[in-house]
């Protein structure tokens, strides 16, 4: 029977080259038909799953694996491995598209420095990027430029505010007029 649900993702993980968790988000929505799947509910189960998955995928080679009844699509970066985990019957092309769009958006946001240090320093951007890609187990966006534009911070440029002698004089004149009005009211 084909999968006719929007809930496609069980977890999203970023592990470093030693298998340590950098970012992890597990999804267990109440309305999901996979809500009562085996394992991955406690921290101990999650860490055990992550360790075993890392052992199987630490060497670059393929980009998809079936591990403990879960479909894992992964991508190696400099010193990180990105994983998106779904149910065994899930569409691996959709999971791969979501993973690649997240990775591309994060690459844009981190200015092509997708490494452990940069991800940890910009953890908030990584989580916002993830939330724009996957919401409660549902893949909501697969366009990396859209994801990056929704997450990116507006830059505060000092060139936007020009302070010169004329603006200071205008401010002084305005304050002077307001003070005179207040004094006249008394």
Image (cartoon, grey):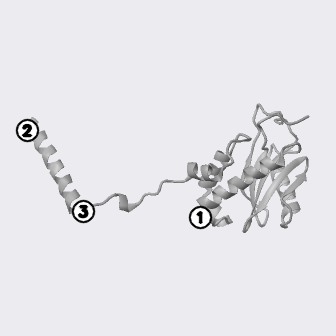
Nearest the eye: 175 or 76: 76
For label 2, the crowd category at 10 Å Cα-Cα, with few meaning under 14, some 14 to 19 and many 20 or more, is few
Q: Element type at marker 3? A: loop
For label 3, the crowd category at 10 Å Cα-Cα, with few meaning under 14, some 14 to 19 and many 20 or more, is few
Look at mark 1 in the image and give the residue it sits on. Answer: 111
- Asked whether residue 43 appears in the rendered view, the answer is no
Answer above or below: position of 58 versus 99: below
On-image quarter of the C terminus: top left
Say which residue appears at 41% left-offset and 60% top-offset. Answer: 157
Mark 3 vs 2, N-terminal side: 3
Spatial separation of the CA atoms under disc 3 and disc 2 = 31 Å
Answer above or below: position of 165 versus 183: below
The reply to whether dot 1 and dot 3 touch (C-beta < 8 Å) is: no
Label 1 or label 2, whichever lies nearer to me, is: 1
Residue 149 in the image: x percent, y percent? 56, 51
Look at mark 3 in the image and give the residue it sits on. Answer: 164
Nearest the eye: 42 or 180: 180
Tally of numbered tags? 3
Spatial separation of the CA atoms under disc 1 and disc 2 = 57 Å
Say which residue appears at 57% left-offset and 48% top-offset. Answer: 150
Answer above or below: position of 28 versus 166: above
Mark 1 vs 2, N-terminal side: 1
On-image quarter of the N terminus: top right
Say which residue appears at 75% left-offset and 42% top-offset. Answer: 27
Residue 93 in the image: x percent, y percent? 81, 49
Q: Element type at marker 1? A: loop
Nearest the eye: 169 or 142: 142
């Amino acid at each position: 029977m084909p999968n006719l649900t929007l809930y496609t993702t069980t977890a999203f993980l970023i592990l470093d080259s030693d298998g340590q968790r950098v970012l992890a988000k597990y999804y267990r929505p109440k309305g999901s038909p996979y809500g009562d799947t085996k394992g991955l509910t406690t921290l101990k189960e999650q860490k055990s799953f992550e360790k075993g998955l890392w052992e199987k995928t630490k060497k670059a080679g393929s980009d998809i694996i079936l591990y403990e009844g879960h479909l894992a699509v992964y991508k190696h970066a400099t010193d990180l491995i990105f994983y998106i985990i779904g149910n065994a019957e899930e569409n691996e092309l959709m999971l791969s598209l979501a993973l690649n769009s997240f990775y591309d958006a994060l690459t844009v946001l981190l200015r092509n420095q997708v490494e452990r240090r940069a991800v940890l320093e910009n953890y908030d951007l990584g989580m916002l990027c993830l939330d724009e890609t996957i919401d409660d187990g549902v893949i909501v966006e697969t366009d990396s430029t859209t994801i990056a534009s929704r997450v990116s911070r507006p830059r505060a440029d000092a060139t936007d505010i020009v302070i010169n002698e004329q603006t200071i004089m205008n401010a002084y004149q305005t304050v002077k007029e307001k003070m005179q009005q207040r004094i006249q009211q008394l």
